[in-house]
Amino acid sequence: MKTPRKSLSKSGRSSDSSSANHDSLSFGKLSERVIFDFLISRMQTTLSQMALHLNMPASTLSRVLAELEHRQMVVRRIIRSGKRGRPEVAFQVRAPGRMVVCQFDGSQLSAAVFDAELHCQALERVHLIRVESPQEAAKQIQTLLDRLLSKVNMKPKDIGTLGLSLNTVWTGHNTLGSSVLPWANESVGGVFASELGMPVELVVPFAPKAMAEYHALPEPFPNSMAYFLVDDGVSAHCIVRGRALRGSSSLAGELGHVTIDPAGPLCGCGRRGCLEALCSGPALRRQLLESLRQNSSGSTLSAGQLEEATPRRVIQLMWESWQSGDPLVRRILDRTFEHLGWALSVVINLMDPQLVTIGGYVLEDKEPWIKEIKDRSVKGTLHGANRQVQIQPGQAKLEDELRVVAAWSAYRPFLDTTG
Ligand SMILES: [Zn+2]
């Protein structure tokens, strides 16, 4: 399936995007496209790793890389001195110029400026409880951009086109949807362009957080990796030989929408009792608040203390209370670990990945919680006790996620978006 490219001006009409002047960079040969796709997925890699994963002769790779370098789409850099003093070289993608991108997860809004070699020049973020409309989101973006641009001495008119990534997916019917941002649809880019007074391009990279995690892995990287993400949403995207498995409707990896309890809380997808409606950051915040409003006895936390706290803040408070043995928090999290442990076993049974990385602010920097989930996954995993699947905390930073958005924003028309 082709993912539509949205580039909208203030009037909502299509406008020149930051990469439109690169339309001449069409790929003549399949090998060029495959190599460039792989470079985008890996951001920086060596010839030997490319040859291994793409199963291509080094001579073909060298020829295509030289061509991509000539077009200024790829640069090479010396990463270390190799055998017999020969320098070892890595290749990485290059953007057409400086780029400003923005990412809206649901409870975190972030923006960054990248140079052409995709080095981050400045980054800003803000944490929010909930944003109810694109107009409200645009106000938050405006404030964040003002802060970001002042750091690098840029004016709004210097941005060109703002690359905006929302926590959304394209479905097989070219419809944009989100279980986390209920107001997001395919025309929302026009609203942002109008509110911000600048061209806005909706960038919808497939599984950007999983791709960022894949970039962050040291070589040799695994043949297959599943990224188990618990933040404002819940998902498990799989990357095989540098390519994310999209599925036929770009809906692969939506682990968060398996039903745990048909009578459970309403999920952002419109159904009830999804894993995401029970275990995401906002879901845990809601459960804790409801429990505290009903009866806070035995807990050191109070509802009043949490009313104005963002999901990230609430998770931090739950982490501290869990460590000190708070019975209410322990009870809520015990259920959560059971659900997530079962979900992890489903991912392993289904995908049999070489590596599972676990990320998202709910579990980030919380090794004991990851251990609880890992331990509980064993009973649901086929040959669980003897299985050698490597499970580790994620390494990617916000900067890495935004870099994926920037690379996609720059080269979206040229990337292979099929399954
Ligand atoms: Zn759902």
Image (cartoon, grey):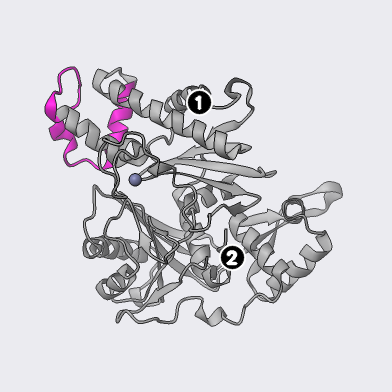
**Amino acid type for the residue under numbered disc 2:** Asp
Would you say the beta carbon of the disc 2 residue lies within 8 angstroms of ligand 1? no
- Please state if 239 lies on the left or on the right of 139 as rendered: right
Above or below residue 161? Residue 138 is above
Circle nearer the N terminus (1, 2) = 1
Of residues 287 and 358, the one nearer the viewer is 287
Residue 139 in view (yes/no): yes
In the image, residue 54 above or below residue 96:
above
Q: Residue at x 66, y 50 (%)?
A: 241
The image quarter containing residue 27 is bottom right
Task: Please give the range of residues in magenta.
Answer: 293-322
**Residue of label 1:** 380
* Residue ID for mark 2: 416
Q: Position of residue 240 (x, y in %)?
A: 63, 48
Q: Quadrant of the C terminus?
A: bottom right
Q: Position of residue 38 (x, y in %)?
A: 64, 58
Beta carbon of the mark 1 residue lies under 8 A of ligand 1: no
Depth check: give the residue in front, 144 or 233.
233
Q: Nearer the viewer's eye, disc 1 or disc 2?
A: 1
Q: CA distance from mark 1 to mark 2?
A: 35 Å
Q: Is residue 280 left or right of residue 22?
A: left
Q: Could you classify mark 2 by the number of other residues whose Cα lies within 10 Å: few (under 14), some (14-19), or many (20 or more)?
A: some
Whether residue 218 is visible to the viewer of this picture, yes or no, is no
Residue 268: percent from the left, percent from the top?
Answer: 29, 49
- As drawn, 293 above or below 167: above
Residue at disc 1, secondary structure = loop
